[in-house]
Image (tube, rainbow, N blue to C red):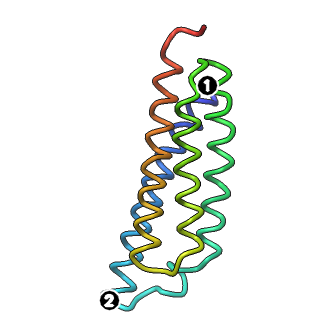
Amino acid sequence: MIRKRLDRAGIVLSGLCAVHCVLGIVLVGFLGLGGGVLLSPAIHRVGLGVAVGIGAVSLGFGVLRHGRIAPLVIGGCGLLLMAAGIVVSHGWPEAVLTICGVTLVAIAHLRNLQGHCAPAR
């Protein structure tokens, strides 16, 4: 099903975002490499846009399918943290907000997948 694929894509993209944050800090902060690319605001805005799109579709339809609102609320909180990561300065504050946000988004997609496995109401 497309909803399950979107949830799985949300989980994978959340993990990739977390790796991007950590690598960005390591490569730019410690080695001074790739700052122009890794810290580009465009990457973060596009990533947030993709996360909002996938989350809205998969988590929104999840509520309609299994009637559980928790994944949508958890995912929304994660997206808010990711958005907050965009407005703070680069470095540790941005990474912490973003990693916490993508963790919540991944948890939301996992809970949504579990809801899809439960019988429909």
State the image coordinates of residue 95 (x, y, percent, origin top left).
Answer: 42, 69
User: Is disc 1 placed on a helix, strand or loop?
Assistant: loop
Q: Which amino acid does label 1 sit on?
A: Met
Identify which residue, 76 or 118, lies in the foreground.
76
Residue depicted at 53% across the width and 20% down the height: 116
Most extreme residue toward the left, as rendered? Answer: 30
Residue depicted at 69% across the width and 48% down the height: 53
Residue under circle 2?
A: 31
User: Is disc 2 placed on a helix, strand or loop?
Assistant: loop
Q: What residue type is labelled 2?
A: Leu
State the image coordinates of residue 94 (x, y, percent, origin top left).
Answer: 47, 72
State the image coordinates of residue 38 (x, y, percent, origin top left).
Answer: 50, 78
Residue under circle 1?
A: 1
Image height of 10 relative to 69, above or below: below
Most extreme residue toward the bottom, as rendered? Answer: 32
Residue depicted at 53% across the width and 31% down the height: 70
The quarter in which the N terminus is drawn is: top right
The quarter in which the C terminus is drawn is: top right
State the image coordinates of residue 90 (x, y, percent, origin top left).
Answer: 48, 80
Residue depicted at 54% across the width and 81% down the height: 37
Q: Does 41 sit left or right of 108 as displayed?
A: right
Question: Tag on residue 99?
Answer: none
Tag nearer the camera, 1 or 2: 2
Image height of 83 relative to 113, above or below: below
